Every structure is written in C-alpha cells, then in structure tokens.
Image: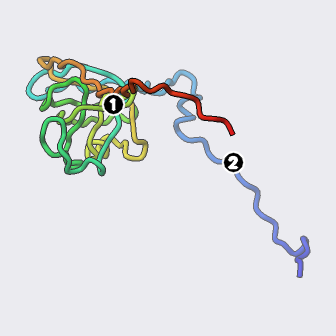
C-alpha cells in the first residue's frame, strides 16, 4: 500500500562541504602552494651500476615475458627463469647489468641481459616476470622506460630475426584454377 507524502518525515537541509586546506591556500592572496616536480619520474637516479657511473642508453617501450619460456634455453645458453631479474635486448652483451626506469611510475629495477629480443616493433627490452612485477607492469603488459648501462658498455652488432624466403618452384608455371 503506497505511503502518502504527508506521512514522511522532513529531511534536514544539506550543508555545503567545507573547503579543504589546499583550496584555502590556493585561493588565499599572497600564498602560493608548493611547486610539484612532475619531471621526477623522467629522470633515472644517477647511481652506480655494476660499480661504474650509469649513463642513459635507450628510451622506448618495455614488455615482459614469462610462462611460455620458463625453463627453456636463452640465446646466452642459460635456462630462462621468469622469477629472476633478467631481460632480453637486441644489442647489449650478455651479462650486462641494465637499470630499467619506468617513466610511468618512477620505479627502477636492475636486470641482467641473458637473451636476445624483443622482436616486436617499437619495443627496446623484454624483462622477466619478476622484473615486470617490480616495475608494476604486469597488468599493462608494457611501459615506457629508460635504460641505463655502465659507461664502459658498448653494444654489439644488432641481431635481427632470420627471414625465411619461399623457394620458387622451377619448371612449373602457376595457372589459375578453372572457374566453375
């Protein structure tokens, strides 16, 4: 049975929410809020890497790989462990320590190069699942990063994936299929 509107109690008026202290500071004359350095995440920390001064080497997208390759041999000959801090890079020598710095959230991780790759356009490094977890990229799958290496490290020649060419059959002409 519906209730008549005369029987409902009256609600108290809604009071406006108080302004937060931040708004008061911004709106106060003569007071400026502290400056926030948003460029912090774009600058990797200038610490030592493998006992040497680190230098920026490359910028681009990083992706991660894990389950399907766990336990298989890498290009360096060792077995891939998705729970170790390792990575794949096209040109850096095997065993090189690399600092991967996320431009998205400012996190750093140091990985050792054990494999070749990535062979996807636009990617500069493939990190293991453990490194991806430290960088906070498991959900996304890739992130924009900066790679830093020790100053003495020189890249090796770029490794490209093998291109398989189809052999042309000699002596047979290709004829169109008869139409029905």
Q: Position of residue 137 (x, y in %)?
A: 37, 42
Question: What is the number of callouts on the image?
Answer: 2
Along the viewing direction, whichever of 134 and 31 lies nearer the viewer: 134
Along the viewing direction, whichever of 77 and 108 lies nearer the viewer: 77
Along the viewing direction, whichever of 8 and 123 lies nearer the viewer: 123
Query: Could you say whether the residue bearing mark 1 is in a helix, strand or loop?
Result: loop
The residue sitting at 18% across, 22% down in the picture is: 54
The residue sitting at 29% across, 21% down in the picture is: 58
- Residue at image mark 1: 119
Along the viewing direction, whichever of 77 and 14 lies nearer the viewer: 77
Residue placed farthest to the bottom in the image?
1
Q: Position of residue 109 (x, y in %)?
A: 24, 37
**Location of residue 103 (image quadrant):** top left
Q: Is residue 17 above or below residue 61?
A: below
Q: Residues within 10 Å of mark 2 (few under 14, many from 20)?
A: few
In which quadrant of the rendered image does the C terminus lie?
top right
- Residue at image mark 2: 16
Q: Residue 50: in sight, yes or no?
A: yes
Q: Which numbered mark, 1 or 2, is in the foreground of this view?
A: 1
Q: Position of residue 61 (x, y in %)?
A: 37, 29
Q: Position of residue 52 (x, y in %)?
A: 10, 23
**Location of residue 57 (image quadrant):** top left
- Discs 1, 2 touching: Cβ within 8 Å: no
């Amino acid at each position: 049975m519906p209730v008549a509107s005369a029987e409902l109690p009256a609600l108290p008026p809604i009071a406006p929410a108080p302004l937060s202290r931040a708004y008061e500071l911004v709106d106060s004359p003569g007071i400026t809020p502290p400056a926030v350095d948003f460029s912090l995440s774009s600058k990797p920390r200038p610490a030592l890497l493998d006992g040497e001064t680190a230098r920026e080497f490359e910028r681009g997208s990083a992706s991660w790989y894990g389950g399907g390759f766990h336990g298989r041999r890498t290009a360096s000959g060792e077995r891939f462990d998705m729970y170790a801090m390792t990575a794949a890079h096209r040109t850096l020598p095997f065993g090189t320590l690399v600092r991967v710095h996320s431009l998205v959230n400012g996190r750093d991780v140091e990985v050792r190069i054990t494999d070749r790759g990535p062979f996807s356009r636009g990617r500069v490094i493939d990190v293991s699942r453990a490194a991806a977890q430290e960088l906070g990229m498991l959900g996304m799958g890739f992130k924009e990063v900066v790679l830093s290496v020790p100053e003495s490290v020189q890249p090796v020649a770029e490794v490209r994936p093998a291109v398989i060419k189809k052999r042309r059959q000699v002596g047979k002409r290709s004829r169109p299929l008869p139409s029905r």
